[in-house]
């Protein structure tokens, strides 16, 4: 790993996930429970989850729920939504984790008589059986090897040296040895945790010929406590520092531990548990000068750093924290994009000391991070405030002076300039309140308390362990025991996921003569290629070849997709060439040496606004109209106009795009192993690039570590790039994209600009809607569908959407820009398009002084109706989900409680929102919906099914097995699934493939029963039937074909049966917003999803929860940032923040609602994408909270909160006296660091 150099492991005992447990020996209880609790989907992150929980259990065999949450804080998962992962860990906790409503002993989801859900039968809440779990026995865990203990205790240690090809690693034996080495190699970095140096080497191309690692030196690892303070060794890890400070705080009086408690508060959210275990105090202080969460507090607490060097008298080489008594206050404050494991946007450490018994300032220190190149002191402001009273006038002067003293340039790196300026004084105000509160607690008679309404501003949001209930229909008690359909069956590969034995592309063993590929990408958005110089790259060791457009034997530009740029580049990140070398390190190093000369071409179009200005589009506009919109506008009470910006989203699948291309010796054949959602497209593009028939190209796809639409179209281009390299070199090519390259090259969800004009009556009834959509399509058109179907009825509707394919059901045009081509993403544009509708519904409600939920219900479909494209549907399941969500979430009761909370709190506000959903399944092109299958039955009774679906983590194979085991009366364990090419990319692959496979198996079962021998043995065993059928020469193979749903759309008439069916749902979310920082906390979410009949409720619940959390991230914290030149800044986990376990709802309730869907297998529905939009309930709950704040401040009641509603967006919208104080720059005088591309 980049954080653990192999040389640092000398003397360590390493346990990997395979060492914890294996399917070949014995699986560990952690692995078993994570799998059986359905905490794994794609499985790529599962080994990391296992190791985090396992490590916790080795130290705390009976952990608390809080410890589980803390242990998982540094892990990322894009599939599950974290809830089942946390739940698997909580099974090891001693205390009960059963939900009890306010201590009453009753479940908050207890069913009441008359419930609509009860009409469909009894509901169950257990998706696994705890009785199946093996117990945890700590005595069976491996011990630390005694020989390593003896090695560590050896008094005669000697210097340890590792000599590499280009670098030397030295571990000194003593402190004097360390000083000697540092004197000899003054520029050599000291490596302890490697949390700063490792990423810099990997991502910033730093090189150091010598590394010095003083691991294990006792002089750097100790804590010494005195009456004056505490001395801590610089080699102490942040986790050890945390433990030491907790112990000291528990032992010493409160007034002596103020600095320690401030440090502990920030240590809880600093990075994740894994980083805190590695990073050291000394390394953090030195290497994080500008955004350290500890340095400002250390400075404010007057900490001293004692240094030592060769030739000088040694003193101490550690940090010393001083303690003070009464009349002294120290606090640390921070604000980040995400509560945990994210760099601070602005942080601060502040301390004040008063004249004894007074509020007269004697000493004052204010230090800020992330506002300059180092921690910045507001020393002049502090000096001016000495002798002042701690009162409101002092605060006002302090805010003005500190803004003058700490200047953030308008084009500062990192952007968010006005927001950071606001945070400077917002955090100061929080400090002011904390100190006033402290003074009051010391002498209530002398110092008045802060206003009651300000109390909630004192504390940050707590990190709570999430809890919740999942409600599904119980299995029919009369269902045969061998029938697994409807049961919460564990994912077919779950155990392999948790043991790390599921094989992904880069897990495949190295092949003889294999080469590694590293891409050479464009650094210009729009430019002519003048020359490409590969000579320096070819001269490097290990480099075999550099591939460019000239090496493509077939089409280099196929259906608009350019494999290798030739003559011109049209975006930053476009592949210009690729280096093939014997190792990835050699390939990567050589790729940097390829010299490309450019000549810029105008115009360079980056944003939608620029595309509109230059009339730059990919398609002609398509329009759907219903009624007479212009006429309707004449007869409404009010008209509002507005626009909503929805920024893009990165897929951030755990397994980056990966391809292994194997050229064969005969007939120009080639086999590609890859993770993709659309193997047929890869086959087609590779064949075109190599100029061979498609039957010469075989694509193999067993599983992939997440996709979400990002592996639909882009793997075809990457496959062609790698295939051309394999063709030229004649050797296998392994092409594994780094995270930064993957984010740069493959792009993501389309940014969208929605413009609306809405006519409505004063009672909230919408009479006319004129809506335009524009999406940023990027430089090239790829397959994409923008589904935007509504839960609301409008008789007069004009939808003129400029988008990549579908709006409502329209094929429309996208803005052509010089960005990498955006592509498919979970929800197919529905999350972007429909949030605009929810935005204008909310605006209408505001204008009518009505609650948004009332306006939604007024305009919602109520009876069998026709869509804008004249397709008939029944909204009864939608109405049911809506009503159930309102009732079961106690929406109106909680809304009253939120209003009461808002009356009592000025700086924190709560908001609730409920959104309905009518999500269209499928594609309005009939031939995309076809599917086929091949079933083989072997003489031992086992069955092999080859079908057209791709396992992405959604449990496709698992559901196929469940369906087939019913069809052939065989045990579920007797199946093997093998995946070959799918005919087309299928967004409802589970439904379609299940349908065709079930029909195929039913046909084969009928053949078995038709056997003469089997007719005489109708109750015989399955394996006996197979043997008898074979003896009678009855074929044990069958093919099946499903023509598909016959969807269609007539664009001339603007009508058609575009979708086979709809998925309905509703979600209610409640948030609390900190108006001073813009942070929010998701308190509770209730989801009711129309699942019809769930083939596997555990998998379906997982899809709904995972999609919701991904949607919540899209609408709140996930933010892509581009430079004005079209360079994507957000290219790593440091820069792009997806939700972690601390962002999911504190209470999370999901119910699968039963309905009928007669056209699908077992009356099921495809749920994998629909839940994405329900994440917008969080966005509109934030809107509701911000609206409450704005009403209290007398601001305009109607406003637009675009997506994502980041802390910056929320804080700027919560206008107050602090936002009014900050200086603002003339936009014409500077070029901003980043721009909005929607």
Image (spheres, helix red, strand yellow):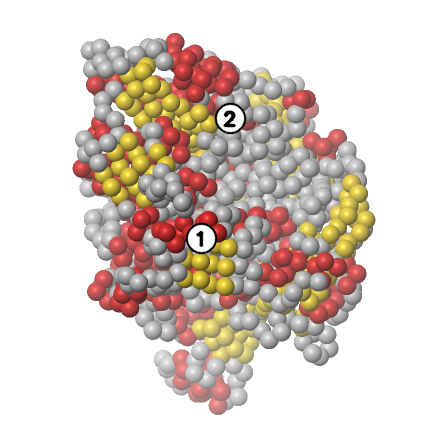
Where is the C terminus found, in terms of image quarters? top right
Residue 216: image quadrant is bottom left
Could you say which is closer to the camera, residue 885 or residue 520? 520
Q: Position of residue 294 (x, y in %)?
A: 38, 36
The residue under label 2 is 419
Q: What element carries label 1?
A: helix
Q: Position of residue 352 (x, y in %)?
A: 32, 21
Q: Where is residue 230 in the image (x, y as percent from the top left)?
A: 26, 37
Residue 979 seen anywhere in this rendered image of the structure: yes
Q: Residue at x 30, y 51 (%)?
A: 218
The residue under label 1 is 181
Query: As displayed, is residue 352 above or below residue 997?
Result: above
The answer to whether 642 appears left or right of 604 in the picture is: left
Could you say which is closer to the camera, residue 179 or residue 1033? 179
Q: Residue at x 47, y 46 (%)?
A: 196
Q: Are marks 2 and 1 in contact (CB under 8 Å)?
A: no
Q: Which residue is drawn at 46% across and 27% down?
A: 376
Q: Which residue is drawn at 40% across and 23% down?
A: 366
Query: As displayed, is residue 116 above or below residue 44?
Result: above
How many numbered dots are placed on residues in this image? 2
How far apart, in angstroms, are the residues tagged by discs 2 and 1? 45 Å
Residue 38: image quadrant is bottom left
The answer to whether 724 appears left or right of 1106 in the picture is: right
Q: Where is residue 827 in the image (x, y as percent from the top left)?
A: 55, 46
Q: What element carries label 2?
A: helix
Q: Residue furthest front?
A: 311
Mark 1: few/some/many CA within 10 Å (<14, 14-19, 20+): some
């Amino acid at each position: 790993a980049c954080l653990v150099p192999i040389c640092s492991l000398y003397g360590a005992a390493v346990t990997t996930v395979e060492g914890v447990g294996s399917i070949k020996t014995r699986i560990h209880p952690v692995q078993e429970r994570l799998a059986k609790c359905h905490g794994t989907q794609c499985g790529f992150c599962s080994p990391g989850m296992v190791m985090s929980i396992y490590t916790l259990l080795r130290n705390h065999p009976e952990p608390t729920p809080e410890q589980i949450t803390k242990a998982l804080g540094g892990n990322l998962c894009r599939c599950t939504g974290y809830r089942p992962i946390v739940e698997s860990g909580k099974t090891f906790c001693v205390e009960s984790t059963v939900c009890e409503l306010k201590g009453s002993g009753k479940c908050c989801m207890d069913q009441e008589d008359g419930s609509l859900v009860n009409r469909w039968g009894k509901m169950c809440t257990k998706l696994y059986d705890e009785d199946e779990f093996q117990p945890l026995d700590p005595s069976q865990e491996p011990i630390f090897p005694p020989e390593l203990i003896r090695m560590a205790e050896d008094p005669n240690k000697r210097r340890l040296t590792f000599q590499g090809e280009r670098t030397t690693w030295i571990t000194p034996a003593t402190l004097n040895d360390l000083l000697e080495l540092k004197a000899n190699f003054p520029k050599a970095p000291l490596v302890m945790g490697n949390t700063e140096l490792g990423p810099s080497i990997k991502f910033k191309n730093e090189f150091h010929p010598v590394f010095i690692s003083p691991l294990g030196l006792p002089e750097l690892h100790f804590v010494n406590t005195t009456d004056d303070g505490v001395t801590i060794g610089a080699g102490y890890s942040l986790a050890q520092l945390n433990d030491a400070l907790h112990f000291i705080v528990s032992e010493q009086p409160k007034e002596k531990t103020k600095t320690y408690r401030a440090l502990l508060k920030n240590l809880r959210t600093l990075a994740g548990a894994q980083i805190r275990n590695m990073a050291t105090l000394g390394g953090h202080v030195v290497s994080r000068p500008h955004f350290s969460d500890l340095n400002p507090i250390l400075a404010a607490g007057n900490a001293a750093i004692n240094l030592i060097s060769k030739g000088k008298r040694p003193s101490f080489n550690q940090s010393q924290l001083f303690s003070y008594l009464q009349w002294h206050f120290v606090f640390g404050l921070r604000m980040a994009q995400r509560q945990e494991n994210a760099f601070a946007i602005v942080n601060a450490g502040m301390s004040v000391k008063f004249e004894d018994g007074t509020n007269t300032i004697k000493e004052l220190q204010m230090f800020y991070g992330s506002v300059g190149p180092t921690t910045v002191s507001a020393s002049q402001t502090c000096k001016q405030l000495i002798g002042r009273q701690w009162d409101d006038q002092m605060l006002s002067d302090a805010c003005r002076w500190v803004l003058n003293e700490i200047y953030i340039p308008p084009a500062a790196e990192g952007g968010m300039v006005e927001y950071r300026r606001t945070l400077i004084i917002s955090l100061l105000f929080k400090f002011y309140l904390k100190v006033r509160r402290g003074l009051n607690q010391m002498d209530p008679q002398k110092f008045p308390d802060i206003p009651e309404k300000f109390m909630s501003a004192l504390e940050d949001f707590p990190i709570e362990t999430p809890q919740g209930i999942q409600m599904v229909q119980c299995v029919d008690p009369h269902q045969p025991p061998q029938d697994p359909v409807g049961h919460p069956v564990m994912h077919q590969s779950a155990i392999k996921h948790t043991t790390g034995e599921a094989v992904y592309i880069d897990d495949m063993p190295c092949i003889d003569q294999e080469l590694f590929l590293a891409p050479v990408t464009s650094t210009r958005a729009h430019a002519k290629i003048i020359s490409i110089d590969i000579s320096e790259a070819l001269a490097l060791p290990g480099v075999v070849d550099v591939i460019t457009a000239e090496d493509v034997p077939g089409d280099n530009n196929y259906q608009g997709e350019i494999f290798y740029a030739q003559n011109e580049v049209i975006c930053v990140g476009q592949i210009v060439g690729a280096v093939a070398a014997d190792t990835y390190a050699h390939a990567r190093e050589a790729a940097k040496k390829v010299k490309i000369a450019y000549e810029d071409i105008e115009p360079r179009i980056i944003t939608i606004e620029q595309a509109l200005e230059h009339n730059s589009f990919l398609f002609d506009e398509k329009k759907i109209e219903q009624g007479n919109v212009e006429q309707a506008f004449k007869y409404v009470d009010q008209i509002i106009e507005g626009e909503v910006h929805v920024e893009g989203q990165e897929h951030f699948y755990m397994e980056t795009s990966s391809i292994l291309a194997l050229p064969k010796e005969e007939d120009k054949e080639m086999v590609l192993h890859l993770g993709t959602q659309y193997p047929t497209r890869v086959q087609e593009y590779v064949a075109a690039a190599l100029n061979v028939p498609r039957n010469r190209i075989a694509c193999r796809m067993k599983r992939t570590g997440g996709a979400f639409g990002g592996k639909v179209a882009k793997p075809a281009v990457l496959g062609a790039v790698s295939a051309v390299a394999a063709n030229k070199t004649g050797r296998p090519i392994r092409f594994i994209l780094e995270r930064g390259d993957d984010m740069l090259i493959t792009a993501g969800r389309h940014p969208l600009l929605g413009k609306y004009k809405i006519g409505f009556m004063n009672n909230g009834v919408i009479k006319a809607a004129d809506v335009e959509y524009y999406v940023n399509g990027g430089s090239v058109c790829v397959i994409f569908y923008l589904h935007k179907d509504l839960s609301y009825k409008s008789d007069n509707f004009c939808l003129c959407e400029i988008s990549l394919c579908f709006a409502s059901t329209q094929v429309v045009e996208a803005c052509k820009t010089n960005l990498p081509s955006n592509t498919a993403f979970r929800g197919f544009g529905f999350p972007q398009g429909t949030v605009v509708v929810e935005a204008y519904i909310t605006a209408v409600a505001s204008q009518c002084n009505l609650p948004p939920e009332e306006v939604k219900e007024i305009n919602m479909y109520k009876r069998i109706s026709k869509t804008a494209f004249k397709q008939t549907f029944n909204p009864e399941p939608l109405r049911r989900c809506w009503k159930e969500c309102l009732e079961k979430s106690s929406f109106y009761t909680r809304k009253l409680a939120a209003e009461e909370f808002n009356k009592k709190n000025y700086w924190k506000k709560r908001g609730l929102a409920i959104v309905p959903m009518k999500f269209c399944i499928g594609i309005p092109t009939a031939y995309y919906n076809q599917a086929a299958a091949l079933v083989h039955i072997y003489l031992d009774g086992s069955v092999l099914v080859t079908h057209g679906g791709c396992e992405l983590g959604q449990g496709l194979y698992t559901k196929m097995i469940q369906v087939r085991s019913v069809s052939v009366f065989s045990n579920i364990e007797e199946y093997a699934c093998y995946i070959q090419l799918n005919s087309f990319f299928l967004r409802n692959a589970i439904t379609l493939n299940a349908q065709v496979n079930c029909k195929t198996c039913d046909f084969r079962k009928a053949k078995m029963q038709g056997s003469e021998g089997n007719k005489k043995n109708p109750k015989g065993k399955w394996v006996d039937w197979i043997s008898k059928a074979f003896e009678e020469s009855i074929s044990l193979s069958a093919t099946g074909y499903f023509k598909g749903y016959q969807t269609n759309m007539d664009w001339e008439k603007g009508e058609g049966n575009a979708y086979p069916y709809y998925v309905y749902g509703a979600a209610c979310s409640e948030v609390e917003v900190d108006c001073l920082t813009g942070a929010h906390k998701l308190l509770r979410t209730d989801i009711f999803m129309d699942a019809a009949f769930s083939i596997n409720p555990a998998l379906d619940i997982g899809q709904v929860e995972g999609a919701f959390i991904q949607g919540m991230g899209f609408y709140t914290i996930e933010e892509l940032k581009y430079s004005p030149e079209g360079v994507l800044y957000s290219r790593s986990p440091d820069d792009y923040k997806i939700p972690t376990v601390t962002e999911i709802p504190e209470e999370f309730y999901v119910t699968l609602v039963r309905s009928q869907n007669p056209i699908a297998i077992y009356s099921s529905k495809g749920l994998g994408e629909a839940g994405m939009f329900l994440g917008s309930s969080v966005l509109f709950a934030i809107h509701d909270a911000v609206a409450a704040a704005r009403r209290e401040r007398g601001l305009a009641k109607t406003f637009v909160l675009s997506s994502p509603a980041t802390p910056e967006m929320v804080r700027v919208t919560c206008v107050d006296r602090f936002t009014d104080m900050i200086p603002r720059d003339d936009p014409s005088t500077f070029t901003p660091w980043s721009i909005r591309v929607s």
